[in-house]
Protein backbone atom coordinates (compact mmCIF):
# COMPACT_ATOMS: atom_id res chain seq x y z
CA UNK A 1 0.00 0.00 0.00
CA UNK A 2 1.52 3.33 -1.07
CA UNK A 3 0.20 6.22 0.98
CA UNK A 4 0.61 9.97 0.55
CA UNK A 5 0.04 12.10 3.66
CA UNK A 6 -0.08 15.89 3.56
CA UNK A 7 0.54 17.93 6.69
CA UNK A 8 2.45 14.95 8.03
CA UNK A 9 4.91 16.95 10.10
CA UNK A 10 2.67 17.52 13.09
CA UNK A 11 -0.40 16.53 15.04
CA UNK A 12 -2.92 14.35 13.29
CA UNK A 13 -0.76 13.92 10.17
CA UNK A 14 2.07 12.57 12.29
CA UNK A 15 -0.28 10.23 14.16
CA UNK A 16 -1.66 8.92 10.87
CA UNK A 17 1.85 8.45 9.54
CA UNK A 18 2.73 6.40 12.64
CA UNK A 19 -0.41 4.36 12.21
CA UNK A 20 0.36 3.61 8.56
CA UNK A 21 4.01 2.83 9.32
CA UNK A 22 2.89 0.37 11.98
CA UNK A 23 0.78 -1.31 9.30
CA UNK A 24 3.90 -1.54 7.11
CA UNK A 25 2.52 0.74 4.43
CA UNK A 26 4.99 2.64 2.26
CA UNK A 27 4.80 6.32 2.98
CA UNK A 28 5.28 9.48 1.00
CA UNK A 29 5.09 12.39 3.41
CA UNK A 30 4.85 16.08 2.76
CA UNK A 31 4.60 19.14 4.96
CA UNK A 32 5.67 22.75 4.78
CA UNK A 33 8.12 22.20 7.64
CA UNK A 34 11.24 20.37 6.44
CA UNK A 35 12.83 19.77 9.85
CA UNK A 36 9.69 18.20 11.30
CA UNK A 37 9.42 16.00 8.26
CA UNK A 38 13.03 14.81 8.50
CA UNK A 39 12.65 14.03 12.21
CA UNK A 40 9.46 12.07 11.59
CA UNK A 41 10.98 10.14 8.70
CA UNK A 42 13.89 9.12 10.89
CA UNK A 43 11.58 8.25 13.79
CA UNK A 44 9.34 6.02 11.64
CA UNK A 45 12.33 4.27 10.13
CA UNK A 46 13.84 3.64 13.55
CA UNK A 47 10.63 2.62 15.26
CA UNK A 48 8.92 0.53 12.60
CA UNK A 49 11.61 -0.05 9.99
CA UNK A 50 9.17 1.69 7.66
CA UNK A 51 9.85 2.68 4.07
CA UNK A 52 9.42 6.44 4.09
CA UNK A 53 10.01 9.13 1.50
CA UNK A 54 9.54 12.75 2.48
CA UNK A 55 9.70 16.09 0.74
CA UNK A 56 8.75 19.51 2.05
CA UNK A 57 6.28 21.42 -0.09
CA UNK A 58 4.11 24.51 0.13
CA UNK A 59 0.91 23.04 -1.25
CA UNK A 60 -0.61 26.46 -1.78
CA UNK A 61 1.93 27.16 -4.55
CA UNK A 62 1.50 25.59 -7.96
CA UNK A 63 5.21 25.50 -8.77
CA UNK A 64 6.05 23.82 -5.46
CA UNK A 65 3.45 21.15 -6.10
CA UNK A 66 4.73 20.68 -9.67
CA UNK A 67 8.20 20.14 -8.30
CA UNK A 68 6.86 17.59 -5.80
CA UNK A 69 5.01 15.80 -8.58
CA UNK A 70 8.07 15.72 -10.80
CA UNK A 71 9.96 13.92 -8.02
CA UNK A 72 7.09 11.47 -7.66
CA UNK A 73 6.92 10.88 -11.42
CA UNK A 74 10.67 10.45 -11.72
CA UNK A 75 10.50 7.67 -9.13
CA UNK A 76 7.42 6.26 -10.82
CA UNK A 77 5.46 6.10 -7.57
CA UNK A 78 1.75 5.34 -7.84
CA UNK A 79 -0.59 5.63 -4.89
CA UNK A 80 -3.30 3.57 -3.17
CA UNK A 81 -4.24 6.09 -0.52
CA UNK A 82 -4.21 9.83 0.05
CA UNK A 83 -4.69 11.34 3.50
CA UNK A 84 -5.40 15.06 3.19
CA UNK A 85 -4.47 16.40 6.59
CA UNK A 86 -2.91 19.75 5.85
CA UNK A 87 -4.88 22.70 7.15
CA UNK A 88 -4.75 25.76 9.38
CA UNK A 89 -6.96 27.35 11.93
CA UNK A 90 -7.00 30.96 12.98
CA UNK A 91 -9.07 31.88 16.00
CA UNK A 92 -10.82 35.17 16.34
CA UNK A 93 -13.33 37.50 14.79
CA UNK A 94 -13.26 38.09 11.03
CA UNK A 95 -12.39 41.76 11.35
CA UNK A 96 -9.98 41.13 14.19
CA UNK A 97 -7.71 39.07 11.94
CA UNK A 98 -5.38 40.11 9.18
CA UNK A 99 -6.72 39.64 5.66
CA UNK A 100 -3.77 37.46 4.71
CA UNK A 101 -4.26 35.01 7.56
CA UNK A 102 -7.91 34.57 6.66
CA UNK A 103 -7.21 33.98 2.99
CA UNK A 104 -4.54 31.51 3.96
CA UNK A 105 -7.21 29.33 5.56
CA UNK A 106 -9.04 29.14 2.26
CA UNK A 107 -5.98 28.68 0.11
CA UNK A 108 -4.59 25.89 2.30
CA UNK A 109 -7.64 24.08 3.65
CA UNK A 110 -9.45 24.19 0.32
CA UNK A 111 -7.15 25.23 -2.54
CA UNK A 112 -4.16 23.12 -1.58
CA UNK A 113 -6.31 20.13 -0.74
CA UNK A 114 -8.00 20.19 -4.14
CA UNK A 115 -4.68 20.70 -5.91
CA UNK A 116 -2.99 17.69 -4.35
CA UNK A 117 -6.11 15.52 -4.50
CA UNK A 118 -6.42 16.08 -8.23
CA UNK A 119 -2.75 15.35 -8.72
CA UNK A 120 -2.69 12.15 -6.69
CA UNK A 121 -5.97 10.81 -8.11
CA UNK A 122 -4.35 10.95 -11.53
CA UNK A 123 -1.42 8.97 -10.09
CA UNK A 124 -3.42 6.04 -8.78
CA UNK A 125 -1.95 2.60 -8.87
CA UNK A 126 -3.82 1.00 -11.78
CA UNK A 127 -6.18 -1.85 -11.11
CA UNK A 128 -6.22 -1.28 -7.34
CA UNK A 129 -8.80 0.13 -5.01
CA UNK A 130 -8.05 3.72 -3.95
CA UNK A 131 -8.72 5.28 -0.55
CA UNK A 132 -9.14 9.00 -0.16
CA UNK A 133 -9.51 10.78 3.18
CA UNK A 134 -10.34 14.41 3.88
CA UNK A 135 -9.86 15.82 7.34
CA UNK A 136 -12.89 17.96 7.95
CA UNK A 137 -13.89 18.84 11.50
CA UNK A 138 -16.68 18.81 14.02
CA UNK A 139 -16.70 22.53 13.23
CA UNK A 140 -18.11 21.67 9.80
CA UNK A 141 -21.44 20.78 11.38
CA UNK A 142 -22.50 24.33 12.18
CA UNK A 143 -21.79 27.90 11.18
CA UNK A 144 -19.25 28.96 13.78
CA UNK A 145 -18.86 32.61 14.67
CA UNK A 146 -15.26 33.50 15.63
CA UNK A 147 -14.13 30.51 13.61
CA UNK A 148 -16.22 31.48 10.61
CA UNK A 149 -13.74 30.94 7.80
CA UNK A 150 -12.27 27.81 9.32
CA UNK A 151 -15.64 26.18 9.94
CA UNK A 152 -16.84 27.07 6.45
CA UNK A 153 -13.66 25.67 4.89
CA UNK A 154 -14.22 22.42 6.78
CA UNK A 155 -17.86 22.40 5.61
CA UNK A 156 -16.56 22.70 2.09
CA UNK A 157 -14.38 19.64 2.59
CA UNK A 158 -17.27 17.66 4.08
CA UNK A 159 -19.65 18.42 1.23
CA UNK A 160 -16.96 18.03 -1.39
CA UNK A 161 -15.93 14.71 0.04
CA UNK A 162 -19.48 13.32 -0.02
CA UNK A 163 -20.03 14.55 -3.56
CA UNK A 164 -16.70 13.30 -4.88
CA UNK A 165 -17.42 9.95 -3.25
CA UNK A 166 -20.38 9.54 -5.58
CA UNK A 167 -18.34 10.51 -8.63
CA UNK A 168 -15.63 8.00 -7.80
CA UNK A 169 -17.92 5.19 -6.69
CA UNK A 170 -17.82 3.48 -10.07
CA UNK A 171 -14.05 3.90 -10.28
CA UNK A 172 -13.17 1.67 -7.35
CA UNK A 173 -12.31 4.55 -5.03
CA UNK A 174 -13.72 5.33 -1.59
CA UNK A 175 -13.84 8.76 -0.03
CA UNK A 176 -13.98 9.31 3.73
CA UNK A 177 -14.57 12.58 5.56
CA UNK A 178 -13.17 12.66 9.07
CA UNK A 179 -14.81 15.12 11.48
CA UNK A 180 -12.92 15.10 14.77
CA UNK A 181 -13.41 17.35 17.78
CA UNK A 182 -10.41 18.88 19.53
CA UNK A 183 -7.19 16.90 19.31
CA UNK A 184 -4.35 17.46 21.76
CA UNK A 185 -1.73 17.81 19.08
CA UNK A 186 0.33 20.74 20.30
CA UNK A 187 0.84 22.65 23.53
CA UNK A 188 -1.32 25.39 22.04
CA UNK A 189 -4.09 22.95 21.14
CA UNK A 190 -3.95 21.53 24.66
CA UNK A 191 -4.40 25.01 26.13
CA UNK A 192 -7.25 25.73 23.74
CA UNK A 193 -9.02 22.55 24.84
CA UNK A 194 -8.43 23.43 28.50
CA UNK A 195 -9.82 26.94 27.95
CA UNK A 196 -13.12 25.44 26.78
CA UNK A 197 -13.40 23.83 30.18
CA UNK A 198 -15.58 20.76 30.48
CA UNK A 199 -16.79 21.04 26.88
CA UNK A 200 -13.25 20.98 25.63
CA UNK A 201 -12.56 17.78 27.54
CA UNK A 202 -15.80 16.12 26.46
CA UNK A 203 -15.46 16.87 22.75
CA UNK A 204 -11.70 16.23 22.58
CA UNK A 205 -10.80 12.97 20.89
CA UNK A 206 -7.91 10.65 21.55
CA UNK A 207 -5.42 11.28 18.81
CA UNK A 208 -4.03 7.76 18.62
CA UNK A 209 -7.50 6.19 18.49
CA UNK A 210 -8.74 8.60 15.85
CA UNK A 211 -5.71 7.80 13.70
CA UNK A 212 -6.30 4.07 13.97
CA UNK A 213 -10.04 4.20 13.34
CA UNK A 214 -9.63 6.59 10.43
CA UNK A 215 -7.46 4.11 8.56
CA UNK A 216 -9.78 1.26 9.55
CA UNK A 217 -12.86 3.11 8.33
CA UNK A 218 -11.20 4.22 5.12
CA UNK A 219 -10.33 0.61 4.36
CA UNK A 220 -13.93 -0.41 5.03
CA UNK A 221 -15.17 2.16 2.54
CA UNK A 222 -17.03 4.38 5.01
CA UNK A 223 -17.91 7.90 3.89
CA UNK A 224 -18.18 9.75 7.20
CA UNK A 225 -16.41 9.31 10.53
CA UNK A 226 -17.26 11.42 13.55
CA UNK A 227 -15.16 10.13 16.45
CA UNK A 228 -16.74 10.02 19.90
CA UNK A 229 -20.31 9.50 21.01
CA UNK A 230 -20.76 13.04 22.34
CA UNK A 231 -19.57 14.47 19.05
CA UNK A 232 -21.99 12.27 17.10
CA UNK A 233 -24.84 13.51 19.27
CA UNK A 234 -23.71 17.11 18.85
CA UNK A 235 -23.56 16.79 15.10
CA UNK A 236 -26.99 15.17 15.02
CA UNK A 237 -28.27 18.16 17.01
CA UNK A 238 -26.57 20.41 14.48
CA UNK A 239 -28.79 18.92 11.81
CA UNK A 240 -31.97 19.44 13.85
CA UNK A 241 -31.42 22.91 15.27
CA UNK A 242 -31.99 25.80 12.84
CA UNK A 243 -28.58 26.99 11.64
CA UNK A 244 -29.13 30.57 12.74
CA UNK A 245 -29.96 29.45 16.27
CA UNK A 246 -26.91 27.18 16.39
CA UNK A 247 -24.71 30.06 15.28
CA UNK A 248 -26.11 32.30 18.01
CA UNK A 249 -25.58 29.68 20.71
CA UNK A 250 -22.03 29.00 19.59
CA UNK A 251 -21.22 32.67 19.48
CA UNK A 252 -22.31 33.03 23.08
CA UNK A 253 -20.20 30.14 24.28
CA UNK A 254 -17.13 30.94 22.21
CA UNK A 255 -16.92 34.56 23.25
CA UNK A 256 -16.30 33.44 26.81
CA UNK A 257 -13.87 30.64 26.17
CA UNK A 258 -11.98 32.66 23.57
CA UNK A 259 -11.43 35.47 26.02
CA UNK A 260 -10.03 32.97 28.48
CA UNK A 261 -7.89 31.39 25.81
CA UNK A 262 -6.50 34.69 24.54
CA UNK A 263 -5.61 35.84 28.06
CA UNK A 264 -3.91 32.49 28.60
CA UNK A 265 -1.99 32.81 25.34
CA UNK A 266 -0.64 36.23 26.22
CA UNK A 267 0.78 34.78 29.45
CA UNK A 268 2.10 31.72 27.80
CA UNK A 269 4.52 32.39 25.04
CA UNK A 270 6.79 29.35 25.04
CA UNK B 1 36.75 22.06 39.70
CA UNK B 2 34.38 19.22 38.84
CA UNK B 3 31.72 19.88 36.20
CA UNK B 4 28.22 18.43 36.27
CA UNK B 5 25.38 18.68 33.76
CA UNK B 6 21.79 18.75 35.00
CA UNK B 7 18.78 18.59 32.69
CA UNK B 8 15.45 20.12 33.66
CA UNK B 9 17.32 22.48 35.95
CA UNK B 10 15.13 25.58 35.80
CA UNK B 11 12.70 24.44 38.46
CA UNK B 12 11.79 21.73 40.91
CA UNK B 13 14.24 18.95 41.72
CA UNK B 14 16.72 19.93 38.99
CA UNK B 15 17.08 23.49 40.27
CA UNK B 16 17.41 22.31 43.87
CA UNK B 17 20.09 19.79 42.83
CA UNK B 18 21.93 22.55 40.94
CA UNK B 19 21.82 24.75 44.03
CA UNK B 20 23.06 21.92 46.24
CA UNK B 21 25.99 21.08 43.94
CA UNK B 22 26.96 24.72 43.43
CA UNK B 23 27.20 25.09 47.21
CA UNK B 24 29.46 22.05 47.30
CA UNK B 25 31.80 23.77 44.85
CA UNK B 26 30.92 22.17 41.51
CA UNK B 27 30.66 23.93 38.19
CA UNK B 28 27.09 23.27 37.10
CA UNK B 29 25.83 23.32 33.52
CA UNK B 30 22.05 23.56 33.55
CA UNK B 31 19.72 22.63 30.70
CA UNK B 32 16.26 24.12 30.53
CA UNK B 33 13.38 24.01 28.08
CA UNK B 34 12.27 27.60 28.22
CA UNK B 35 14.54 30.60 27.76
CA UNK B 36 12.62 32.77 30.19
CA UNK B 37 12.81 30.13 32.93
CA UNK B 38 16.55 29.71 32.29
CA UNK B 39 17.10 33.41 32.85
CA UNK B 40 14.92 33.39 35.94
CA UNK B 41 16.73 30.43 37.46
CA UNK B 42 20.14 31.89 36.69
CA UNK B 43 19.21 35.21 38.28
CA UNK B 44 17.90 33.53 41.41
CA UNK B 45 21.11 31.48 41.80
CA UNK B 46 23.21 34.59 41.25
CA UNK B 47 21.11 36.49 43.78
CA UNK B 48 21.88 33.79 46.34
CA UNK B 49 25.55 34.39 45.70
CA UNK B 50 26.22 30.88 44.37
CA UNK B 51 25.83 31.56 40.67
CA UNK B 52 29.46 32.23 39.77
CA UNK B 53 30.02 28.78 38.27
CA UNK B 54 26.65 28.18 36.67
CA UNK B 55 25.82 28.14 33.01
CA UNK B 56 22.49 27.64 31.25
CA UNK B 57 21.75 26.07 27.88
CA UNK B 58 18.31 25.99 26.37
CA UNK B 59 16.99 22.88 24.63
CA UNK B 60 13.70 21.07 24.12
CA UNK B 61 15.15 17.69 25.02
CA UNK B 62 12.17 15.60 24.00
CA UNK B 63 13.14 16.31 20.37
CA UNK B 64 16.19 14.28 19.39
CA UNK B 65 17.39 16.99 17.05
CA UNK B 66 17.51 19.33 20.04
CA UNK B 67 19.43 16.82 22.16
CA UNK B 68 22.00 16.56 19.39
CA UNK B 69 22.17 20.31 18.92
CA UNK B 70 22.77 21.05 22.59
CA UNK B 71 25.13 18.07 22.87
CA UNK B 72 27.31 19.65 20.18
CA UNK B 73 27.46 22.84 22.26
CA UNK B 74 28.17 20.93 25.46
CA UNK B 75 30.93 18.86 23.84
CA UNK B 76 32.62 22.04 22.63
CA UNK B 77 32.32 23.69 26.00
CA UNK B 78 33.52 20.71 28.05
CA UNK B 79 36.43 20.08 25.70
CA UNK B 80 37.54 23.70 25.95
CA UNK B 81 36.78 24.69 29.53
CA UNK B 82 36.62 21.49 31.56
CA UNK B 83 39.67 19.60 30.28
CA UNK B 84 37.32 17.26 28.45
CA UNK B 85 36.04 15.85 31.72
CA UNK B 86 32.47 15.61 32.89
CA UNK B 87 32.11 14.43 36.44
CA UNK B 88 28.36 13.84 36.50
CA UNK B 89 25.35 13.89 34.21
CA UNK B 90 22.00 14.17 35.95
CA UNK B 91 19.21 13.16 33.57
CA UNK B 92 16.40 14.77 35.45
CA UNK B 93 14.16 16.53 32.89
CA UNK B 94 10.71 15.00 32.91
CA UNK B 95 7.10 15.66 32.10
CA UNK B 96 3.61 14.30 32.55
CA UNK B 97 1.12 14.20 29.68
CA UNK B 98 -2.49 13.33 30.29
CA UNK B 99 -3.06 12.53 26.62
CA UNK B 100 -1.06 10.62 24.05
CA UNK B 101 1.15 13.26 22.46
CA UNK B 102 4.21 12.77 20.31
CA UNK B 103 7.52 14.41 19.56
CA UNK B 104 8.67 15.35 16.08
CA UNK B 105 9.96 11.80 15.68
CA UNK B 106 6.50 10.47 16.48
CA UNK B 107 7.66 9.18 19.89
CA UNK B 108 5.40 9.42 22.92
CA UNK B 109 6.44 12.53 24.86
CA UNK B 110 6.85 11.11 28.37
CA UNK B 111 8.93 8.22 27.07
CA UNK B 112 10.93 10.58 24.86
CA UNK B 113 11.74 13.15 27.55
CA UNK B 114 11.79 11.18 30.81
CA UNK B 115 13.93 8.42 29.38
CA UNK B 116 15.10 8.52 25.77
CA UNK B 117 16.55 12.04 25.95
CA UNK B 118 18.83 10.89 28.75
CA UNK B 119 19.83 7.82 26.78
CA UNK B 120 20.92 9.93 23.82
CA UNK B 121 22.55 12.70 25.85
CA UNK B 122 24.57 10.17 27.88
CA UNK B 123 25.75 8.63 24.61
CA UNK B 124 26.90 12.00 23.35
CA UNK B 125 28.74 12.84 26.58
CA UNK B 126 30.03 9.34 27.31
CA UNK B 127 33.70 9.90 26.59
CA UNK B 128 33.86 12.92 28.90
CA UNK B 129 32.14 10.94 31.64
CA UNK B 130 34.48 7.98 31.29
CA UNK B 131 37.50 10.27 31.23
CA UNK B 132 36.46 11.71 34.59
CA UNK B 133 35.45 8.37 36.11
CA UNK B 134 32.07 10.05 36.29
CA UNK B 135 28.56 9.26 37.40
CA UNK B 136 25.23 9.22 35.55
CA UNK B 137 22.14 9.83 37.64
CA UNK B 138 18.61 9.20 36.45
CA UNK B 139 15.74 10.81 38.34
CA UNK B 140 13.63 7.82 39.22
CA UNK B 141 10.42 7.25 41.09
CA UNK B 142 9.09 4.59 43.39
CA UNK B 143 6.25 4.22 40.91
CA UNK B 144 8.50 2.19 38.62
CA UNK B 145 7.65 -0.82 40.76
CA UNK B 146 4.77 -3.05 39.83
CA UNK B 147 4.97 -2.32 36.14
CA UNK B 148 6.77 -3.95 33.25
CA UNK B 149 7.99 -2.56 29.96
CA UNK B 150 5.33 -2.84 27.25
CA UNK B 151 7.71 -4.36 24.74
CA UNK B 152 5.19 -4.69 21.94
CA UNK B 153 4.01 -1.11 22.20
CA UNK B 154 6.55 0.88 24.14
CA UNK B 155 4.99 4.21 23.10
CA UNK B 156 1.65 2.97 24.50
CA UNK B 157 -0.20 3.90 21.34
CA UNK B 158 -2.83 1.23 22.06
CA UNK B 159 -4.71 2.35 25.15
CA UNK B 160 -2.62 5.22 26.46
CA UNK B 161 -2.78 5.88 30.17
CA UNK B 162 -0.81 8.80 31.63
CA UNK B 163 0.20 7.01 34.79
CA UNK B 164 1.30 3.87 32.96
CA UNK B 165 3.35 5.98 30.57
CA UNK B 166 4.94 7.83 33.47
CA UNK B 167 5.76 4.69 35.44
CA UNK B 168 7.16 2.93 32.41
CA UNK B 169 9.34 5.91 31.50
CA UNK B 170 10.75 5.86 35.04
CA UNK B 171 11.30 2.10 34.95
CA UNK B 172 13.24 2.65 31.73
CA UNK B 173 15.51 5.06 33.62
CA UNK B 174 16.34 2.36 36.18
CA UNK B 175 16.97 -0.19 33.41
CA UNK B 176 19.26 2.29 31.65
CA UNK B 177 21.27 2.88 34.83
CA UNK B 178 21.63 -0.86 35.23
CA UNK B 179 22.68 -1.33 31.61
CA UNK B 180 25.30 1.42 31.93
CA UNK B 181 26.79 -0.27 35.00
CA UNK B 182 26.81 -3.65 33.26
CA UNK B 183 28.70 -2.14 30.33
CA UNK B 184 30.93 0.59 31.68
CA UNK B 185 31.55 0.14 35.41
CA UNK B 186 34.86 -1.50 34.44
CA UNK B 187 35.94 1.84 32.92
CA UNK B 188 35.08 3.67 36.12
CA UNK B 189 31.68 4.99 35.05
CA UNK B 190 28.83 4.42 37.51
CA UNK B 191 25.14 5.00 37.01
CA UNK B 192 22.39 5.49 39.58
CA UNK B 193 18.69 6.06 39.89
CA UNK B 194 17.68 8.49 42.59
CA UNK B 195 14.18 8.16 43.96
CA UNK B 196 13.19 11.66 45.08
CA UNK B 197 10.00 10.56 46.81
CA UNK B 198 6.91 12.74 46.56
CA UNK B 199 8.12 16.29 45.95
CA UNK B 200 6.31 19.60 45.69
CA UNK B 201 7.10 20.49 42.07
CA UNK B 202 4.99 21.57 39.11
CA UNK B 203 5.55 18.48 36.97
CA UNK B 204 1.85 17.58 36.98
CA UNK B 205 0.72 21.12 36.19
CA UNK B 206 2.62 21.77 32.98
CA UNK B 207 0.74 21.01 29.78
CA UNK B 208 -1.50 18.44 31.41
CA UNK B 209 -5.26 18.10 31.25
CA UNK B 210 -7.81 19.34 33.78
CA UNK B 211 -7.97 16.05 35.69
CA UNK B 212 -4.22 15.40 36.02
CA UNK B 213 -3.74 19.04 36.91
CA UNK B 214 -6.29 18.81 39.71
CA UNK B 215 -5.04 15.50 41.09
CA UNK B 216 -1.47 16.77 41.15
CA UNK B 217 -2.45 20.05 42.83
CA UNK B 218 -3.93 18.04 45.69
CA UNK B 219 -1.25 15.39 45.81
CA UNK B 220 1.76 17.70 45.78
CA UNK B 221 0.61 19.39 48.98
CA UNK B 222 1.85 16.31 50.81
CA UNK B 223 5.20 16.42 49.05
CA UNK B 224 8.57 17.39 50.44
CA UNK B 225 10.42 20.50 49.27
CA UNK B 226 12.79 19.85 46.34
CA UNK B 227 15.75 20.59 48.64
CA UNK B 228 15.16 17.24 50.37
CA UNK B 229 15.85 14.94 47.37
CA UNK B 230 18.55 17.36 46.18
CA UNK B 231 20.66 16.19 49.12
CA UNK B 232 20.61 12.66 47.71
CA UNK B 233 22.02 13.89 44.39
CA UNK B 234 24.69 15.70 46.38
CA UNK B 235 25.45 12.53 48.32
CA UNK B 236 25.77 10.34 45.21
CA UNK B 237 28.11 12.91 43.61
CA UNK B 238 30.14 13.64 46.74
CA UNK B 239 31.05 10.14 47.94
CA UNK B 240 34.74 9.71 47.19
CA UNK B 241 34.53 6.09 46.15
CA UNK B 242 31.44 5.64 44.05
CA UNK B 243 28.48 4.22 46.00
CA UNK B 244 28.05 0.55 45.15
CA UNK B 245 24.26 0.41 44.84
CA UNK B 246 21.95 1.23 41.96
CA UNK B 247 19.10 3.07 43.67
CA UNK B 248 19.30 5.77 46.31
CA UNK B 249 16.74 7.57 48.39
CA UNK B 250 17.33 9.94 51.30
CA UNK B 251 21.08 9.45 50.77
CA UNK B 252 20.75 5.74 51.46
CA UNK B 253 20.70 2.76 49.16
CA UNK B 254 17.23 1.43 48.51
CA UNK B 255 15.75 -1.46 46.61
CA UNK B 256 14.39 -1.34 43.09
CA UNK B 257 11.56 -3.11 41.32
CA UNK B 258 11.67 -6.75 40.27
CA UNK B 259 11.58 -5.77 36.62
CA UNK B 260 15.00 -4.17 36.90
CA UNK B 261 16.96 -7.12 35.53
CA UNK B 262 19.96 -7.35 33.24
CA UNK B 263 17.83 -9.10 30.65
CA UNK B 264 15.30 -6.28 30.50
CA UNK B 265 18.08 -3.71 30.66
CA UNK B 266 19.82 -5.26 27.64
CA UNK B 267 16.60 -5.50 25.65
CA UNK B 268 15.75 -1.85 26.35
CA UNK B 269 19.29 -0.72 25.60
CA UNK B 270 19.17 -2.37 22.19
CA UNK B 271 15.72 -0.97 21.41
CA UNK B 272 16.78 2.52 22.49
CA UNK B 273 19.86 2.40 20.28
CA UNK B 274 17.55 1.63 17.40
CA UNK B 275 15.16 4.44 18.29
CA UNK B 276 18.01 6.95 18.49
CA UNK B 277 19.86 5.54 15.49
CA UNK B 278 23.08 5.18 17.52
CA UNK B 279 25.40 2.46 18.74
CA UNK B 280 27.10 2.80 22.12
CA UNK B 281 30.80 1.92 21.93
CA UNK B 282 32.17 -1.15 23.71
CA UNK B 283 33.97 -0.54 27.01
CA UNK B 284 37.34 -0.91 25.31
CA UNK B 285 36.58 1.45 22.42
CA UNK B 286 36.03 4.70 24.30
Image: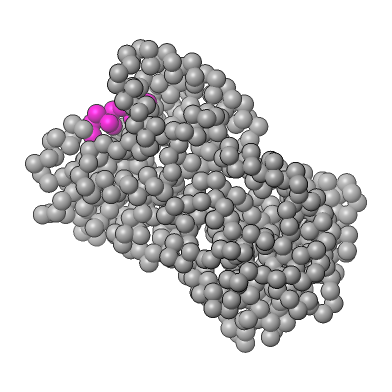
Q: Position of residue A27 (x, y in %)?
A: 31, 57
> Which quadrant is the N terminus of chain B positioned in?
bottom right
Q: Is residue B219 left or right of residue A201?
A: right
Q: Residue at x 62, y 64 (%)?
A: B145
Determine the main secondary structure of the stretch shown in magenta.
helix
Q: Position of residue B215 (x, y in %)?
A: 64, 42
Magenta segment, which residues? A151-161
Please give the count of numbered marks on the rendered protein.
0
Q: Position of residue B155 (x, y in %)?
A: 48, 58
Q: How is the image coloured?
A: one colour
Q: Residue furthest right?
A: B49
Name the residue located 22 percent from the left edge and 41 percent from the top edge. Answer: A222
Q: Is residue A241 above or below residue A22?
A: above
> Does the rendering let one see residue B284?
yes
* Vertical comparison of A107 with B7: above or below: above
Vertical position of residue A158 compared to residue A213: above or below: above
The one nearer the camera, A64 or B2, is: B2
Q: Quadrant of the C terminus of chain B?
A: bottom right
- In the image, residue A261 sits, relative to residue B275, either above or below, namely above
> Does residue B250 appear to the left or right of A237 in the view shown?
right
Residue B34 % position (x, y): 66, 46
Instruction: Please name the residue shown 26% across and 45% down the image.
Output: A217
Q: Residue furthest left?
A: A170
Residue A153 sits inside the magenta stretch: yes
Is B45 within the magenta?
Answer: no
Q: Is residue B38 visible?
A: no
Amino acid sequence: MNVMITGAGGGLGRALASECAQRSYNLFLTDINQSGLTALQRGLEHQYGACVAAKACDLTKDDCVDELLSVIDRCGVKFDMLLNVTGVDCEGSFLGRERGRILEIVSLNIGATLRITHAILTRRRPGRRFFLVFVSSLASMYPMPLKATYAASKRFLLDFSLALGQELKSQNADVLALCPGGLATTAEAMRAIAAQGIWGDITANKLERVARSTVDKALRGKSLYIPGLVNRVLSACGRLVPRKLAAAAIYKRWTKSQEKWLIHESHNTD
Amino acid sequence: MKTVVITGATSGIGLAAARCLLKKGYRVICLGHNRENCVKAELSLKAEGIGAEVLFFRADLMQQGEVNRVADLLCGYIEKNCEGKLYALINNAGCVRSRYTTTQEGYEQQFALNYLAGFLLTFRLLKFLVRAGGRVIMTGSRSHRGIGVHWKDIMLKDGYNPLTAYKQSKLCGYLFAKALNDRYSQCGLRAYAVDPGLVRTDIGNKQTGTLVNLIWLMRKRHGAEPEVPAETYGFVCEEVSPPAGLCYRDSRECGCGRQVTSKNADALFELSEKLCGIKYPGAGEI
